[in-house]
Image (tube, rainbow, N blue to C red):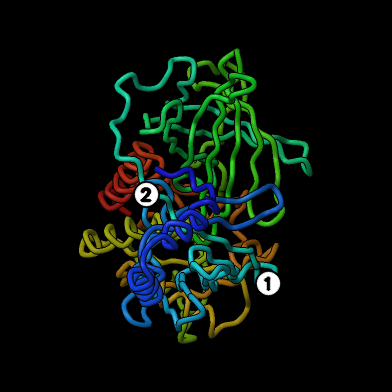
Amino acid sequence: MSRYTFHRAIAVATLAVLSVFPAGASAQKKSKSESDPLSGRWDAALLVPSGPVAFGLDLKRRGKAVSGAILNGPERMAFSAGSFDGTTLVLRLDEYDGRITATFEDAARTRLVGQYQRQTRSGVGTYKFVAERSPKPSKGPIPAAGIEPSMEVSGDWLITIRDPNTKDPDVSDATFTARPSRVAGVADLTGTIIPVSGDYGLLAGTLRRDPVSGAAVLHMSRFDGIHVVKIDGTLQPDGSLIGKLSSGLSYEGTWKAIRKERNAVGDPVPADPFTLTKVKDPAAPFAFSLPDPSGAMVSLTDARFTGKVVVVDIMGTWCPNCHDSAPLLADLSRRYKAKGLEVVMLAYEYTPDLARNARQIEIFRKKYGIEFPILMAGTTADGEIARTLPQLEGFGAYPTTIFIGRDGRVKRIHAGFSGPATGERHAHVKREFESLVLELLDAKP
């Protein structure tokens, strides 16, 4: 896997090689490049104050249409659509209301520059985008020796992230997997950080020995349309990891991680997703009345919900972890609806623009084949949850999933969702959700 660093020398070397060919051969090569300058792999990055957040692109051009995917290590995230008019490349991520727009910077057309823009809570966010043709991957054998024991970071960790603007550190789970690469002394590294609010998605990068200090250093990043994350760290002599984390256009924090098995009794641990959010009065039936995208009001007192088990999912179409949980909720709805299960999503969006929000909800619904209601609950502005769902306290995560029994009362509330990047945790949370649904379906009102 490429480290996603940039290689200006490759473009220069390519031009130098072409210059030694006869004019006809050079013209033929140039003509082919001009007819399809985009197809193939690219090393890309969004530029933030702490440095480039690296990722890959795999593009394919057919006429003016461009298809392809964002690459984070082995993970592929397809673009909704793309186009190239001979000058400007546009790559759309409709589910996040975002797009990359770029043009070629050099005559050899091996470097793209432009921007990534998407809607955020505070307006349209803009990142500088750059990309260069990926070098040809090494075809040599992977060293049989594997990862040096003194560099091994694979496994489960507890990571404490310190925000310079707050006093209380955030303790989360984290997991890393290092695999030998074809580059001597460099390991391919994947993993994720798993706060109670939901994981960061698959981070990808490298683990290598610093030539000056001799310490094992890691560099990982992720871009998926919403996450723009970069973490750098160093393995310490005591076996801990320390480093820096940046997210978005401005956030920067520090972090320290220890092996999970080394956590002592009484040390801080991650929050329990089943205890973060509660209802003020568990004896009171849960209630809301909110519009669907057509404007029709939907209430838990409607006949369709009476005497049913109801799963209420507080989400937003902008939320990657909500995209991770949607396939599970759609599957549970299809399999257990006939037994008395109802599912409803409450969408809290970035803007009060009803037409835009309805469009994003429809994109989300179609993507996951959702047949249950998705209601337009409000925005992500402070105080919106308290205003629309006043029975809740301690809300702190999108998604938050509420399990309601046939008597209309809240039985359990789960904050966040562990997606595919978390491995066994993802399988575990899917089993937990299904077990809860089955338990409530079997319970008598």
**Residue 39 placement: quadrant:** bottom left
First-in-chain label (1 vs 2): 1
Along the viewing direction, whichever of 229 and 357 lies nearer the viewer: 229
- Point out which mark residue 316 bears: none
Is the residue 309 above or below the residue 234 in the image? below
Could you tell whether 286 is left or right of 138 in the image?
A: right
- Residue on which disc 2 sits: 136
Q: Amino acid at mark 1?
A: Gly
- Residue at position x 51%, y 65% from top? 316
Check the picture and name the quadrant holding the C terminus.
bottom left
Could you tell whether 327 is left or right of 347 in the image?
A: left
Is the residue 83 above or below the residue 9 in the image? below
Along the viewing direction, whichever of 230 and 107 lies nearer the viewer: 107
Check the picture and name the quadrant holding the N terminus.
top left
- Residue at position x 41%, y 62% from top? 18
Could you tell whether 81 is left or right of 12 in the image?
A: left
Is the residue 2 above or below the residue 90 in the image? above
Q: Secondary structure at mark 2?
A: loop
**Residue 126 placement: quadrant:** bottom right
Q: Position of residue 344 (x, y in %)?
A: 40, 67
Is the residue 361 above or below the residue 6 in the image? below
Q: Position of residue 67 (x, y in %)?
A: 35, 71
Q: Position of residue 157 (x, y in %)?
A: 50, 27
- Residue at position x 59%, y 40% from top? 231
Q: Nearer the viewer, mark 1 or mark 2?
A: 2
- Residue at position x 69%, y 35% from top? 254
- Residue on which disc 1 sits: 123
Q: Position of residue 41 (x, y in %)?
A: 39, 58
Q: Amino acid at mark 2?
A: Lys
